[in-house]
């Protein structure tokens, strides 16, 4: 059997060797609790503080503005719910987001509504980006926080986050962006951007699952989701995961160092795969094609097919892809992202996401580009 091909890097990535090597001492002999005052504790605290500084540097932030979390979902919830709870007493009782956000943000917005707040959804353009004028019309003095994903995890479209941040800042609204798919794919310098809150996740950039970070601009008040001892300046109580924080720091530094060359490499691979598919399947639809896109995500629908059957056929050939967000695996409903963009149900149900990354080579792309059309033909019942 041919070597398996992994085209699901937007779902998760393998832990990098450098990351694992950096983590291992803190899973072994350097096991101290960073809140302890003895030598083991002091050693752990020093490593944690250094990791915080390194992650902050990668984002153009200050160390005290970084909060380690269990991943992007926790960071998104802390940003949306935590900031709204702190601001609702001042009359800012609404949150503003978009219908194409990750479920972590959408469910956080729903929770705001359940707690008596208002949930507002900015309109979208069919190409997959936010309608800026529509967003601005909803960004008034009643909104506490707005949350817009920088790079969409299903179709890869890049949202105009800096422009939206300017609108939010003018209106006195906190600006949060889920940058889980954006970190390493678009330049981020938080000192120069109108962003108050930002989420990243380790396992998308070669760190371990179960660690992420949230940027909280100095002076931004957040109500913690958890309650306990006042670790992390009271923003996230609980004993810190030193090993995973150290690993995240290494992964973040490697991601930033490789940004230019890796984005160019991934973009070329993604574009080649897209061109091969369109050349062999002219009626294939590339979602988000008319908008700026991150270099690693390709979302395609082929009329007359369904994603479940195609994914199974690809898997049997050793090719791993997904129907969209990995967090919605097993869902029988079409993508909420494509539905929000007005994509008909039959095409939304046919969507396949192929995401390139560290394991992708030109040979992988050529093999998938040659094989995919034949699988589509069989799914359509038109194979010779």
Image: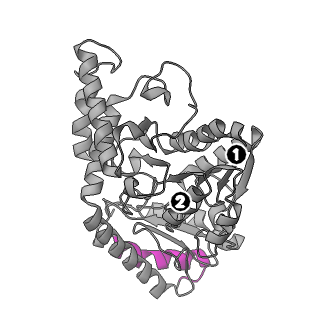
* Contact flag, marks 2 and 1 (Cβ < 8 Å): no
Report the magenta stretch's main SS: helix
> What SS does tag 2 mark?
helix
Relative height, residue 18 to residue 276 (above, below): above
- Which residue occupies the foreground of this view, 136 or 374? 136
Instruction: Tell me the residue at 34%/36% (across/down).
Output: 245
Q: Would you call the spot at circle 1 few (<14 residues within 10 Å), some (14-19), or many (20 or more)?
A: many
Residue furthest to the top: 38
Residue 55, percent from left and from top: 32, 44
Horizontal side of residue 350 vs 206, given as left or right: right
Horizontal side of residue 188 vs 302, given as left or right: left
Instruction: Say which residue label 1 marks.
Output: 92
Instruction: Tell me the residue at 55%/37% (across/down).
Output: 221
Residue 178, percent from left and from top: 51, 52
Q: Would you call the spot at circle 2 few (<14 residues within 10 Å), some (14-19), or many (20 or more)?
A: many
**Range shown magenta:** 365-383
Counting residues from the N terminus, which is met first, the one under dot 2 or under dot 1? 1
Distance (Cα) linking label 2 and label 1: 17 Å
- Which residue occupies the foreground of this view, 181 or 366? 181
Q: How many marks?
A: 2
Which of the 4 image quadrants contains residue 307? Answer: bottom right
**Rendering colour mode:** one colour
Relative height, residue 242 to residue 293 (above, below): above
Q: Does the image show residue 131?
A: no
Instruction: Tell me the residue at 36%/62% (across/down).
Output: 187
Q: Does the image show residue 191?
A: yes
Q: Is residue 195 magenta?
A: no
> What SS does tag 1 mark?
loop
Instruction: Tell me the residue at 26%/30% (across/down).
Output: 47
Instruction: Say which residue label 2 marks.
Output: 165
Residue 98, percent from left and from top: 64, 59
């Amino acid at each position: 059997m041919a070597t398996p091909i992994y085209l699901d890097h937007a779902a998760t990535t393998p832990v990098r060797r450098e990351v694992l090597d950096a983590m291992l001492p803190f899973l072994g002999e350097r096991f101290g609790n960073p809140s302890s005052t003895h030598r083991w504790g002091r050693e752990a605290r020093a490593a944690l503080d250094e990791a915080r500084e390194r992650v902050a540097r990668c984002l153009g932030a200050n160390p005290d503005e970084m909060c380690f979390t269990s991943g992007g979902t926790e960071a998104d919830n802390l940003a949306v719910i935590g900031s709204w709870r702190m601001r609702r007493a001042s009359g800012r009782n609404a949150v503003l987001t978009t219908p194409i956000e990750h479920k972590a943000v959408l469910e956080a917005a729903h929770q705001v509504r359940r707690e008596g707040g208002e949930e507002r959804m900015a309109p979208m353009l069919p190409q997959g980006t936010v309608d800026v004028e529509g967003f601005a019309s909803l960004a008034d003095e009643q909104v506490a926080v707005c949350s817009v994903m920088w790079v969409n995890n299903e179709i890869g479209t890049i949202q105009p986050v800096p422009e939206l941040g300017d609108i939010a800042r003018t209106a006195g609204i906190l600006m949060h962006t889920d940058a889980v798919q954006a970190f390493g794919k678009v330049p981020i310098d938080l000192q120069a951007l109108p962003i108050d809150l930002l989420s990243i996740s380790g396992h998308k950039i070669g760190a371990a699952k179960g660690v992420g970070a949230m940027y909280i601009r100095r002076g931004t008040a957040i109500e913690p989701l958890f309650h306990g001892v006042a670790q992390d300046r009271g923003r996230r109580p609980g004993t810190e995961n030193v090993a995973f924080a150290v690993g995240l720091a290494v992964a973040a530094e490697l991601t930033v160092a490789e940004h230019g060359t890796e984005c160019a490499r991934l973009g070329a691979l993604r574009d080649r795969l897209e061109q091969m598919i369109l050349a062999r399947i002219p009626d294939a639809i590339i979602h988000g094609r008319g908008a700026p896109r991150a270099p690693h995500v390709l979302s395609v629908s082929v009329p007359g097919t369904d994603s479940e059957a195609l994914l199974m056929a690809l898997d049997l050939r050793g090719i791993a892809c997904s129907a969209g967000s990995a967090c919605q695996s097993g869902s029988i409903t079409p993508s909420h992202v494509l539905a929000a963009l007005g994509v008909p149900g039959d095409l939304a149900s046919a969507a396949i996401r192929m995401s390139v990354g560290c394991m992708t080579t030109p040979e992988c792309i050529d093999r998938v580009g040659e094989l995919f059309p034949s699988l589509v033909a069989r799914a359509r019942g038109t194979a010779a």
